[in-house]
């Protein structure tokens, strides 16, 4: 296995739409394993989508504190409620902003055995699922930020969101 490089903001791959996983095979399982290894090797992590490591496939790994979750071809089929909270991204290291998300989601996905599953999530796990699924559609958390600033986690310095969005526009 190998830890993969996480693409930084501004990389045009982050703005592309990922393709569905057509078949579950050794290549898919290797990708899941390497993404999990990358996730666990990264500080401040909760989830990782395949486009963040340069692979345009609808694959996500996440661990929001209760163990590894793998999602293939995930689709949000239900949203309810609302929450606003600070959100960050491995492709924007050190920066965060206030984002509005659904409080509850239901996600249809495939597991490693190719079985369709419906997962229900609330709170932080719901945020993580929405954030990572957005990555599969070329949507970044900065597209949802409620203020016109991002904040640096160590210095608390503000950065103008419009400058960030200009750097991350779809190619």
Image (cartoon, rainbow, N blue to C red):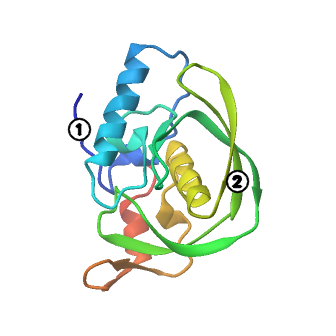
Q: Which mark is residue 131?
A: none
Q: Residue at x 49, y 62 (%)?
A: 141
Circle 2 SS class:
strand
Q: Earlier in the sequence, mark 1 or mark 2?
A: 1
Outermost residue toward the front in this view: 66
Q: Position of residue 35 (x, y in %)?
A: 35, 37
Front-most of residues 82 and 10: 82
Quadrant of res 5? top left
Name the residue carrying label 1.
3
- Image coords of residue 118 (percent x, y): 71, 37
Q: Is residue 76 above or below residue 166?
A: above
Q: Secondary structure at mark 1?
A: loop
Residue 105 badge: 2
- Asked if residue 122 lies left or right of residue 149, the reply is right
Q: Residue at x 53, y 72 (%)?
A: 145
Pick whichever, 102 or 40, lies toward us.
40
The local crowd at label 2, few if under 14, some if 14 to 19, many if 20 or more residues have their Cα within 10 Å, is: many
Give the x, y percent position of residue 114: 60, 20
Q: Residue at x 36, y 62 (%)?
A: 167
Work out how far the residue at label 1 is from the one at label 2, CA to CA, in angstroms: 30 Å
Q: In the rendered image of this protein, does residue 16 appear above or below residue 42?
A: above
* Residue 54 visible (yes or no): no
């Amino acid at each position: 296995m190998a830890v993969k490089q996480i693409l930084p903001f501004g990389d045009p791959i982050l703005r592309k739409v990922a393709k569905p996983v057509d078949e579950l095979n050794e290549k898919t399982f290797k990708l899941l394993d390497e993404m999990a290894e990358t996730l666990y090797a990264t500080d401040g992590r909760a989830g990782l989508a395949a486009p963040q490591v340069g692979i345009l496939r609808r694959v996500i790994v996440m661990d929001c504190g209760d163990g590894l979750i793998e999602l293939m071809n995930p689709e949000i089929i239900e949203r309810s409620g609302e929450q606003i909270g600070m959100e960050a991204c491995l492709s924007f290291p050190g920066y965060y902003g206030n984002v509005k998300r659904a409080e509850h989601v239901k996600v249809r996905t495939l597991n490693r055995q190719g079985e369709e599953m419906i997962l229900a999530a609330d709170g932080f796990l719901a945020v993580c699922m929405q954030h990572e699924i957005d990555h599969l559609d070329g949507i970044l958390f900065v597209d949802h930020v409620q203020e016109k600033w991002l904040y640096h986690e160590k210095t608390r310095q503000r950065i103008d969101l419009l400058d960030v969005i200009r750097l991350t526009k779809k190619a």
